[in-house]
Image: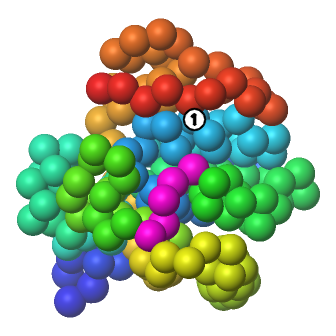
């Protein structure tokens, strides 16, 4: 069925910013604050929010929020591995959300808010599994994060891109590399 439905196939896009750059996808609740956290990481050359892991081709935000498409809200990160390791990105991921809640982050409830690491190669898969095992040793509650191959990525609508940096819905927040200002999510 993957041959007839692009949503079920792998993400075949190429990373931007240089020949050696790589892609990573993370689902950790509402993508606005998660994206800003990744934007602040040295070595991240681009971030974009969108939808993946569902069965509907070209979903909209409204489609995804219906809970009927199977998609997760994710941040796709383009990064330079000579500056920023995949393990560094995993650290940001684990630090940005509660990986023990099923289909929920704070007040955001629905399958689109699930915790997920979506890998592009076996090295990423290995590092993701190892990081989950290490994180599980730190906390008593069971981690429910899914670790799956990256499926086709669909960019979310433009108004979602760099939402907090642009100040949509409130005050602009810094995406400056290395910034440690608290991230405030609103919407």
Q: In the displayed structure, does residue 135 sit left or right of residue 21?
A: left
In the rendered image, the quadrant that contains the N terminus is bottom left
Q: Evaluate whether residue 23 shows in this view.
A: no
According to the picture, the residue beneath numbered tag 1 turns out to be: 36
Q: In the displayed structure, does residue 116 sit left or right of residue 64?
A: right
Q: Is residue 98 magenta?
A: yes
Percent from the top left, x then y, of residue 28?
46, 56
33 shown above or below 140: above
Prevailing SS of the magenta stretch:
loop
Q: Residue at x 29, y 78 (%)?
A: 8
Percent from the top left, x then y, of residue 66?
9, 54
Q: Quadrant of residue 58?
A: bottom left
Q: Quadrant of residue 61?
A: top left
Q: Which residues are magenta?
A: 96-100
**Residue sitting nearer the eye, 97 or 121:** 97
Percent from the top left, x then y, of residue 48?
50, 43
Circle 1 SS class: helix
Percent from the top left, x then y, of residue 144?
43, 77
Residue farthest front in this picture:
140
Q: Is residue 164 magenta?
A: no
**Residue sitting nearer the eye, 5 or 49:** 49
């Amino acid at each position: 069925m993957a041959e007839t439905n692009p949503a079920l196939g792998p993400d075949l896009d190429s990373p931007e910013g240089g020949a050696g750059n790589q892609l990573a996808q993370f689902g950790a609740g509402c993508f606005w604050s998660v994206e800003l956290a990744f934007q602040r990481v040295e070595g991240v050359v681009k971030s974009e929010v969108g939808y993946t892991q569902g069965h509907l081709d070209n979903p909209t935000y409204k489609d995804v929020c219906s809970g009927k498409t199977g998609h997760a809200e994710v941040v796709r990160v383009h990064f330079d591995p000579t500056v920023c390791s995949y393990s560094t990105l995993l650290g940001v991921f684990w630090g940005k959300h509660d990986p023990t809640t099923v289909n929920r982050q704070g007040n955001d409830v629905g399958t689109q808010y699930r915790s997920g690491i979506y890998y592009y190669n076996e090295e990423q898969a290995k590092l993701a599994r190892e990081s989950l095992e290490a994180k599980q040793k730190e906390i008593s509650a069971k981690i429910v994060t899914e670790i799956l191959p990256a499926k086709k990525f669909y960019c979310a609508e433009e108004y979602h891109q760099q939402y907090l940096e642009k100040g949509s819905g409130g005050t602009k927040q810094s995406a400056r590399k290395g910034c440690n200002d608290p991230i405030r999510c609103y919407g």
